[in-house]
Amino acid sequence: MSVQERKRRERANRERLIVATARELAEQQGWDAVTTRRLAERIEYSQPVLYSHFRGKREIIGAVALEGATEMATALRAAASEADGRRARVAALAHAYLEFAERNPAVYDALFQLDGGLAFAREDTPEPLKDAFAALLETLGEVAGEGVHPALFTELFWSALHGLATLTRAGRLLPEGAGERLDLLVDRLGVL
């Protein structure tokens, strides 16, 4: 292994450590607790080393979001692939989305609530974000209905899921109605 190759590997490992530590800290204490000083202490590197990887917290949030988008896409595809029938696939996808949001609140915030410096719904959108949307589109596009643009239907359904995830987490919806809400969403949006 060349010296350059070893340095690249070490740099990639440090970057993964920074992202994993930021994510862990955010999941435990919230994103306000994630500071470059705290991260530097936890990973046992100086702040200048941390800044050599990320210009600041915003870029770290973006890195967590990209990692989370990849995980979300995998979870959505796995859930949909295990279900039989269109309605069952959509319901499984919806459940997987809400479960991901509930299990990973800091990652979900990095993806959809916080400024990670990432472009959404544009040509320069990073591939992991495009792939997460594609994971939704693959299942939802097949139930969009005649004359309905599949991507628009997917955006609408995704918006409803995001609303459910956000309102549930904020305690604005009664927990006992969660299953019925999801069934209603799946059924009323024409997924039969």
Image (tube, rainbow, N blue to C red):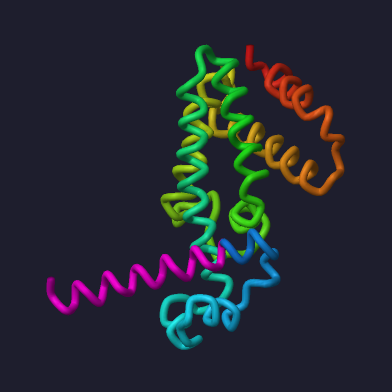
Would you say 64 lies left or right of 175 here?
left
Q: In the rendered view of the protein, which quadrant contains the C terminus?
A: top right
Viewer-side residue, 109 vs 154: 109
> Is residue 39 depicted above or below 102 in this figure?
below
Q: In the rendered view of the protein, which quadrant contains the N terminus?
A: bottom left
The kind of secondary structure the magenta stretch mainly shows is helix
Residue 157 visible in image: yes
Please state the extent of the stretch shown in magenta in the rendering: 1-23
How many tags in the picture? Answer: 0
- The answer to which quarter of the image holds residue 158 is top right
Query: What percent of the width, then of the height, locates residue 170?
Result: 81, 49
Would you say 20 lies left or right of 163 here?
left
Query: What percent of the width, then of the height, locates residue 171?
Result: 84, 45
Would you say 160 lies left or right of 81 here?
right
Viewer-side residue, 124 vs 79: 79
> Is residue 90 depicted above or below 73 in this figure?
above
Viewer-side residue, 88 vs 134: 88
* Magenta-drawn stretch contains 183: no
Residue 147 visible in image: no
**Image point 30% across, 73% down: which residue?**
10
- The answer to which quarter of the image holds residue 57 is bottom right
- The answer to which quarter of the image holds residue 184 is top right
Query: What percent of the width, then of the height, locates residue 76?
Result: 52, 34
**Image point 75% across, 46% down: which residue?**
166
* Magenta-drawn stretch contains 4: yes
**Image point 85% across, 38% down: which residue?**
173
**Image point 66% across, 61% down: which residue?**
28
Which residue reaches farthest left? 1
Query: What percent of the width, then of the height, locates residue 110?
Result: 61, 58
